[in-house]
Amino acid sequence: MDAVTTVESEVRELIRRSGIDPARDPRSLDKLVREAVADYDERSLHGGLPTLPNVDDAVKSVLDAVAGYGPLQPYFDDPEVEEIWINEPSKVFIARGGVAELTTTILSADLVQDLVERMLKTSGRRVDLSSPFVDAVLPDGSRLHVVIPDVTRRHWSVNIRKFVVRANHLDDLVGLGTITPQAARFLGAAVAAGLNVLVAGGTQAGKTTLLNCLSAAIPSRERVVTCEEVFELKIPLRDVASMQCRQPSLEGTGEIPLRRLVKEALRMRPSRIIVGEVRQAESLDLLIALNSGLPGMCTIHANSAREAITKMCTLPLLAGENVGSRFVVPTVASSIDLVVHVALEHDGVRRVREIVAVPGRVEGDVVEVADIFTQHDGILRRSDGFPPHPERFRRAGYDVAALLAQE
């Protein structure tokens, strides 16, 4: 047993004796750890104990082990690391700037399980044989997803998407190179005018970040209700009611799916509804809400704006046999106003690739779209399309023609 491990064992015993809660009393814990390291360092000078290579490093390692996430804590502390995932104890990966790399961190199977249990402690959620999947949010806002055997082949599969705050407003996205200034001004005006926006993209494309930035353009007087699988959205407004789904209990009861949240949101006097992501039948309830005149936004997994529209015409069919495309397709055409497609490029930068309008017309069960901004040679440029509902822009004090004039 090396010196740091010995000190860690001593600190854990001191925590048990003192009754300190590492999560709620970090100051007392820090003091206890520093005193324990100093005491050990002094004892090691008299021989009989392995010496500490560096006292400050020892303090950090012990704090990470008892109050943080052990060997993973340096990746949580590194602002450049966006994502951490574990395929097996000897294969821990991270992503920096959208690029994946295999780390030198080696864990044990028991340590992986211990870390997961530590992460889930504050969420109130669980993972076991009866519930082999779990989604949860860590105290710092990072999102945790875990799958265990026998759904996985042998090892626990752990994925952590860190909550890296790099953009809160559309102007921040302009600074990051995600969107052009003109497109950002247009989207801000569209949101303020109450148009319904669908944000599309692949995994890690930046959909949630873009949705957060779009939400910052919502007028401050509005009441926003959000529905999510787990809390990820950070809406910078005064009047926000947020809801997340709930897992079933050990008896298999008490589950609250996203579809239920969307229905309940309509009873909460919303001025606007935001759904973190639509994947299944909840898309029907969202379409019905938007079709009733309630403005809203959501995200969806899709490889292009047109594929996003096609998917929105398909997902509601999962709601039941009595739901047909003859109802869904025209409802999508009249409910969705804009689709913004964002993607993670090969250079690790997230960029908006296209912004299309949905004029509301259907031709042969195909929803027509009009290109407002499209990407040419890697740059988002103005196309010839215009958004629907120009009267909403006028009421909000915007001139659409001026916003979209060629620069």
Image (cartoon, rainbow, N blue to C red):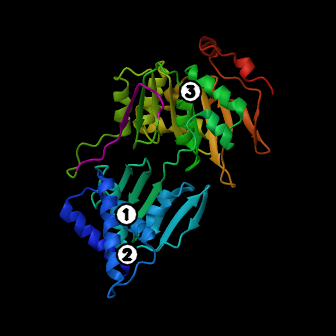
Residue 109 visible in the picture: yes
**Magenta span contains residue 237:** yes
Tell me the distance, in whole angstroms, between the alpha carbons under discs 3 and 2: 50 Å
Q: Which residue is mark 2?
A: 4
Estimate the spatial distance between the alpha carbons at disc 1 and disc 3, rounded to whole Å.
Answer: 40 Å
| Local crowd size for mark 3, using a 10 Å CA cut-off: few (<14), some (14–19), many (≥20) | many
Circle on res. 217 = 3
Q: Which residues are magenta?
A: 235-249
Residue 350 position within the rendered picture, expressed as x and y whole percent measured from the top left: 64, 47
Task: Provide the residue designation for mark 1.
Answer: 63
Q: Could you tell me which secondary element the residue under label 1 belongs to?
A: helix
In primary-sequence order, the first of circles 3 and 2 is 2
Please tell me which residue is depicted at 45% across the width and 69% down the height of the picture: 57
- Kind of residue indicated by mark 3: Ala
* Closest to the observer, 5 or 338: 5
- Left-right relation of 138 to 36: right
Residue depicted at x 67% and y 51% = 345
Residue 15 position within the rendered picture, expressed as x and y whole percent measured from the top left = 24, 63
